[in-house]
Each structure stands twice: as C-alpha cells, then as structure tokens.
Amino acid sequence: MAKKKLNVAMIGYGFMGRAHSNAYCKVNHFFDLEYQPVLKVACARNAEQIKTFADNWGYESTETDWRKVIERKDVDAIDICTPNNLHKDIAIAAAEAGKMILCEKPLAMNGPEGEEMCKAVEKAGVANTVWYNYRRVPAVTLAKQLIDEGRLGKIFHYRAVFLQDWTISAELPQGGQGLWRLDAAAAGSGVTGDLLAHCIDTAIWLNGSMKDVSAMTETFIKERVHTATGQKQAVGIDDACAFLARFKNGSLATFESTRYARGHKALYTFEINGEHASIQWDLHDLHRLNYFDHRDDSIVRGWRSVHVTDGDMPYMDKWWVPGLQIGYEHSFVHQVADFLDNVAKGKPTAPTFRDALETQHICDAVLKSAKTGSWEQVPS
Ligand code: SOE
C-alpha cells in the first residue's frame, strides 16, 4: 500500500540536523509504518552551507529564512535543530501555522519559555515531541520495562553522570558552529541544559518526578573570545554542575556533569538501586544493560551483563539477527518511528513538550539552587 507522505522541514544543519536527517532516511526501510517522511526543505541562514547539507541528505529545496519555511503549504512537520535561543519563536510560529513539531533538546532556554511553547502546541492541537533520544536506546527502554514490571521493587537510589572534556582549552571561542553551546545567550545554560537535561529526562521517565534539588556549579574559564565580536567576553554558562535530588517516590539521587573530565568524551552512565534488584547502563557500551537480582540463588548471584540484541527486546526485532548490535544513531530512528506511528494513531509521542517542560523546570531549579546555596523545590 502506498505510504502517506509527511513533508519535513529541517531548520538547522549541525550535528543534530545530520542525526535527524539520517533517521528520516532510514526509518521506512526498517519499520512498517503508514507514513513516510519526505525531506522537503532544509533551512539555515548560510545559503551555500545549507545547499551542501540539502544535497548530501536529499532535501528537495532550501530556504534561508525559517519564517518562509513555516509559511509553506507543502510542509507538514518542522524539525527544530537550531541553537536553543531560537526554539521558542520557531515552535510558536510553527504551532500557529498548524505544523507538527519535533524539537531538539532542551525544549527551551528556561521554564517560562517552555511554558509558552507548551501552551502554543496544546492550543493548536499539533503533534509535538522533543528529541531526548536516549530513552530509545533499546537497553534504556528495557530498563524502563524492568522497573515498570516491578522487578527492582522499591527504588532507593538513582545515580547519573554525563562527562565530557571538549571545552578544557581556554583558546576555544564562544559562539559559532557547535560552539554556541559555550554562549549563554544562545544556549541558556552550559552542561545543565545540554547534558544533565538528558540525565534528568531519563531519570524522571524511569523513576518519576523530583521533589527538590541542591546544586553547585562552576565556570572554570571565565572569559572567552566571542566569535560575533572578536573580543574576550565573560562566559555565562556552567562548565560543571553536580546536584543532589529527592524524588517523590522517596529515593535519593546524585547527578554530575562536566565538560572538564579529561579522558571522557560522552560518558553517560546511570545506576538504579532497588529493594530486590539494581540496574546499570553506560553509553559507551550502549547495547548492554547490567542487572543484579538479589532473589537469584545465592551461589549464582551476581551482576549479569545483558546483551540487548534479541528480538524480544525493545525495538530489536526491527534490526538484524540476535547478537548483532545497533548504535547511537538508531535511537533517533526509533523516535521517528514512534512519532510516525503515533501520528497515524492520533496519539502523543513522549517526551511531548509538556513532558520536556518538567525537565526544564528541574534545570531551572538546579541553576537557582547553585546561586542561592539552598535546596530548591521543583515546581510542579
Ligand atoms: C554536546 O557535546 C552533545 O552533543 C549534546 O548536545 C548532545 O545532546 C549529547 O547527546 C551529546 O553531547
């Protein structure tokens, strides 16, 4: 049967523009879906660069003004892959034009912006999702399944870290391609919004809502040249952040993130300890889920390393044969597959803007706590 076409407009063309485009290209080869994404238009201010990007991925056309993209009648969905400071205006305009929206994380610069975006998509009734892709790594989805089945029992502890080392050099400017993440005016925050937001999204999905947080942050390099002015300017982002949290289910948590952990490129790990069992996951070994179950016979009790590649494990029946792994990029394919399937069924795709707003509120509370030195409630 001929597939229904879903025309996608990509706004932005960096690392995430590539990850999402790859997902749109691959999804129908592996998932049996009613809808097929069509790469209709790619948009960025630099005409030459967006043309190169569009040609590489097979976009039918290009634009240099995102407002023109939103006006186009032949576009069904807007994929926002711009720096964070543009998310709000693009998402609100897209919602008002009745377009579906797939927005890169974090949802917004802060909670109040996120709230406006939620209101806009909810008023317009348009499908929306935020690309917190790690939920759809099969081993992480399996962790959710094990927790929901009650295998861990009551949860006592949640521990997560996301460590990188790419901003240690003081010579690195703030602003520009990729480096807008160092510019508070474009990013909103540093590791809190960029990396801890991933940890928080996974945590609230697996372990429920948080009650309050107590945080510390540090900006190790206080001034960097800004690419827009060529001048040294104060750095406004958090280079590192660690926080304690209490979940509403009574469990305690620690979260840590930095871009100054020499030797670590993208070490995202979490561990959850429950009454009966514990689980551990590590992005560097993303197809494995470590599981310890105290109810096992004591003479064979120990940590098992579950190779999440079998057909009865989340998403894995869509890929190769048991034992053969998939990777990082597949988490985006899974999100597109779920989104298209839900569009066909008229169902929301988590995390929706509203789900992602909870993460945004937690990030705000973390940054506030780092300033006040006090525990801060997470607004519900
Ligand atoms: C930062 O280096 C970054 O690319 C984040 O922006 C992504 O969200 C994360 O998944 C990997 O690291």
Image (cartoon, rainbow, N blue to C red):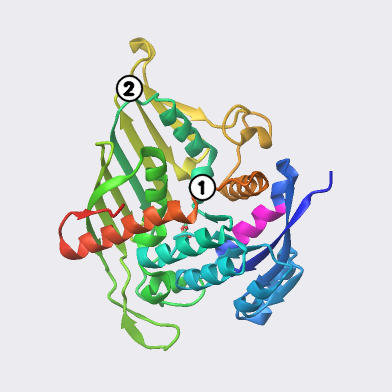
Q: Which residue is mark 1?
A: 350
Magenta stretch prevailing secondary structure: helix
Q: Mark 2 or mark 1, which is nearer to you?
A: 1
In the foreground, 96 or 46: 96
Q: Quadrant of residue 95?
A: bottom right
The residue that mark 2 highlights is 276
Q: Which mark is residue 243?
A: none
Query: 280 or 201: nearer the eye?
Result: 201
Does 306 sit left or right of 46 as displayed?
A: left
Residue that protrudes farthest toward the front in the picture: 123
Q: Tell me the magenta residue range.
A: 18-25
Identify the residue at image location x=50%, y=41%.
286
Q: Where in the figure is residue 196, as x and y percent of width and height? A: 36, 54
Q: CA distance from mark 2 to mark 1?
A: 28 Å
- Check if residue 23 falls in the magenta segment: yes
Query: In the rendered image, which quarter is residue 149 located in?
Result: top left
Disc 1 on helix, strand or loop? loop
Pick whichever of labels 2 and 1 is earlier in the sequence.
2
Taking the image as shown, residue 8 lies to the left or right of residue 208, namely right
Pointer 1 local density, CA inside 10 Å: few below 14, some 14–19, many at least 20: many
User: Measuring 45% from the left and 35% from the top, which residue is drawn there?
Assistant: 144
Q: Amino acid at mark 1?
A: Ala
Decide: is 191 above or below 49.
Answer: above
Q: Disc 2 vs disc 1: Cβ atoms closer than 8 Å?
A: no
Taking 225 as reference, is 79 above or below it?
above
Q: For residue 184: magenta?
A: no
